[in-house]
Structures are given as C-alpha cells and as structure tokens.
Image (spheres, rainbow, N blue to C red):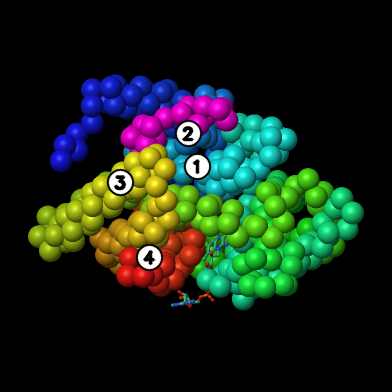
Amino acid sequence: MDLSFTPEEQKFREEIRAWVKENLPQEISHKVHNALELTRDDLQSWAKILGKKGWLGYGWPTEFGGPGWTAIQRHLFEEETALAGAPRIIPFGPVMVAPVIMAFGNAEQQKRFLPGIASGEVWWSQGYSEPGSGSDLASVKTKAERKGDKYIVNGQKTWTTLGQYGDWMFNLVRTSNEGKPQTGISFLLLDMKSPGVTVRPIKLLDGGHEVNEVFFDNVEVPAENLIGEENKGWTYAKHLLSHERTNIADVNRAKRELERLKRIARSEGVYDDQRFRDEIAKLEVDIVALEMMVLRVLSAATSGKNSLDVAGLLKIRGSEIQQRYSELMMLAGGPYSLPLIREAMEAGWQGNFPGGNPALAPLTSTFFNMRKTTIYGGSNEVQRNIVAQTVLG
Ligand SMILES: Cc1cc2nc3c(=O)[nH]c(=O)nc-3n(C[C@H](O)[C@H](O)[C@H](O)COP(=O)(O)OP(=O)(O)OC[C@H]3O[C@@H](n4cnc5c(N)ncnc54)[C@H](O)[C@@H]3O)c2cc1C
C-alpha cells in the first residue's frame, strides 16, 4: 500500500501552509500552542478569516459554495491548520448542521442559512441532549406543538456547548407520542434570540464556562424552520451524528499536542527517561494508526459508503488518545501539574497565578477538560455497543 501523497497533493499542502502562515493571527496561534483560553472573538475572527477565503465550509461541495476538495485535500487542510496552531473550527454550523441542511433542507432554507454558516457570521449551537435524554437520545421530551404556521416549543436542553454565544440552535423536538420514540422527533431550527429562550451556564471542573442549560418557555418558531418532514427528524439527527463523531477524533490536534507533550517533557527533564519515551512512542504509534483510519473513513464517505459504524470507532480511539496525551503531560509536569490552585482554576486555562510555572499551569485544567471526550458526542460505552451491533450483528 502506497501511503505517500502525490506531487499535486504536496503542492496543495504547501499552498495551504503558506496561506495559513500569512493569515493566522500570531496571538491566536500562541494561545492554541499553549492551551490558553480562546475568547469568542478569537474563535470567530479565525472563522471569519476562513469564511472570507471560502474555507470555513472546507468540506462542502462547490454547489453550496464550498471548495469541493477531495478527502485527502480536506485532511491536509485540517493537518496544516492544526499544526500551525489554528483554533478548531467550531463544528456546530459548518460541520454538523450544514450537511443536514444541504441533504434534507429545501432550497429556501439552503439559501437562507448556508451563507451565514459559510462566512462565520452566525454562531450555531446543538440542542440534542436533555436531562434524562443523553445516551437514550430518542427519549427527548422538548415539545413542539404545531399552531397554524408556528411551532410552540417548551422544554429544556442541556450540555449546550458554547450556547452562551449561540445565535441559532438546531433542535431535536418531540412532535408526536405515537409509535416508537424515534418516529415522533422533528428537526427544528430555532433563533436563540426569540422570546422565551433562557441560557444558563454550567460550571465545569476546570473552572471554565463551556456548557449551558437552555430552557424554552412557549418559544414561537416559524413552521418554515422545520427541516424535512415532521416526525422524520431522527433520520436527519443520525446523519449529523456521523459527522460529529468523525470530527471528534481530531487526529490533527493530537499530532500538535504530541509535539507539546514532547516540549513539556524536554523542559521538565523526563524526555531522556527511557520509560517515559516509551509512553510517548506508544502514543505516537496510536496517533498514526488513527490517522490511517480517518483517511479510510474519508475516502469511504467520498465514494458514498455509509461510515457511521467506523465513525463510532474513530470517536472511541480519538477520545482515548486525547485523554492519554493530557495524562502524559500531567506526568511530565510532575508536581507542577498537580495543585488545584483556586486562582488558577478561576482563571480558566490561563493559569497566571503567583509562583506558578506558566508553561505548566494549564495542565490540570486541560486534564479535567479532556474527561469530557469519552462522554460527549455519544459516550464511548454506547459507541462500543453500536460498533459491536454493526460488526457482530
Ligand atoms: C462537555 C460536554 C459537551 C457537550 N455538548 C453538547 C452539545 O453541545 N449539545 C448536546 O446536545 N449535547 C452535548 N453534550 C451531551 C452529550 O452528548 C451527552 O453527555 C452524552 O450523550 C451522554 O449522555 P448523558 O450525559 O445523559 O449520560 P447517560 O446517558 O446518563 O449515561 C451515563 C453513563 O451510563 C452509560 N450508559 C448509558 N447507556 C448505556 C448503555 N446502553 N450501555 C452501556 N453504558 C451505558 C454511559 O456510557 C455513561 O457512562 C455534551 C456533553 C459534555 C460532557
């Protein structure tokens, strides 16, 4: 098997690298390389820079204004941006809801919603999980009742990532209680500035405000915001989840963090320890294996094969790797990584506390933050069940 890139692909990589070098603000890449907290402005200004170039929707086909890149080109783009220290593209708009709007939305909805996603102007949030409906997502209770040309929405979503910035939210809502739970769900786009929407923060272990509870109290949503058919939302939801899970694998960030791990290990004097180097080597091998798997999924998706089962595998391996590098960084930092200094926690990922080593300070919060990866996007236990059912029948 020849795994090397063609001369054209290498040239493409060089072009991306040069453009990113020219356009990625240095203060943003500094924060990313050192795991410092990114503000909404940091995230959105990078999204808008990409949007202007037509690359925020880098996985989109040309008919919807995307670059129409191949799976390999998309991978090279992700790799070059990650290694250069670009923030992750917030996936809810361009990676998650956009493919659903393209596949199942009508022409009017595509015209209305896709440009704001492609330009990075409009911030989207994901309204799937509810208290009591996480793994058992089909049990969602948030109710949308049709009244004339509107839906009246009542209920609660939870764990809404960065929902405090959200302009729009895509939601799974219950429109029927007939039959199996899956058959009564609809996919509704909701303006978060509507009267009756309340967003409340959930404080995380790392001190950060990354997730929220969102409450709906008689929120009026125009019926034209329904995607596809009423009660068919489960099909659209699953389409979206395969994109989410492949995205969570985030192999290119793992490559960048591997370099950070090596930097920390060198600066703390453990890089020359044979046992510690073995651990780094094992991690590196796992990252390369994950990369090969990602490339296989991308090329399968290009040829139209359903890759949902493999997306679950990617999610499992990718999230385990993310936790592993955050653990090794803690080990490399030794006692400097450990203290739960209140000021550092309150400072989120900044860790500018008196007497601390600023290079190491974010490690505890990064470690805690990475605990989420085996839970969100569908917990790893549940992914294992799905993979087992798909493979073993
Ligand atoms: C940081 C973070 C960000 C998130 N962001 C979003 C977001 O933006 N939007 C959104 O909609 N959701 C979001 N989520 C929610 C996420 O999708 C859910 O947390 C996840 O699906 C698990 O659901 P749950 O938390 O209700 O846990 P539960 O479903 O209650 O599961 C609890 C435990 O039981 C295990 N379990 C459950 N069922 C089974 C089973 N059948 N077999 C074996 N084990 C099982 C699970 O693996 C888990 O360990 C986020 C979660 C986190 C932690």
Whole-percent x and y of residue 42?
55, 39
Crowd class of label 2 (few under 14; some 14 to 19; many from 20; radius 10 Å): many
* Residue 75 magenta-highlighted: yes
Gap in angstroms between the C-alphas marked 3 and 2:
18 Å
Residue bearing the label numbered 2: 58
Mark 1 or 3 closer to N-term? Answer: 1
* Residue mark closest to the camera, 3 vs 2: 3
Between disc 2 and disc 1, the foreground one is 2
Q: Position of residue 118 (x, y in %)?
A: 59, 33
Q: In the rendered image, which residue does mark 4 sit on?
A: 390
Whole-angstrom CA distance, mark 3 to mark 4, is 17 Å
Report which residue position mark 3 lands on: 296
Q: Residue at x 19, y 34 (%)?
A: 4
What kind of element bears circle 3?
helix
Q: Is residue 153 left or right of residue 323?
A: right
Q: Which residue is mark 1?
A: 89
Measure the C-alpha gap from mark 1 to mark 3.
Answer: 22 Å
Magenta residues, dominant SS class:
helix
Q: In which quadrant of the rendered view does residue 382 lie?
A: bottom left
Residue type (three-letter) at the residue carrying disc 4: Thr
- Look at label 3 and name its amino acid: Arg
Q: Looking at this view, name the residue that lies furthest to the bottom.
A: 132
Assess disc 1: are there few (<14), some (14-19) or many (≥20) residues with their C-alpha within 10 Å of its C-alpha: many
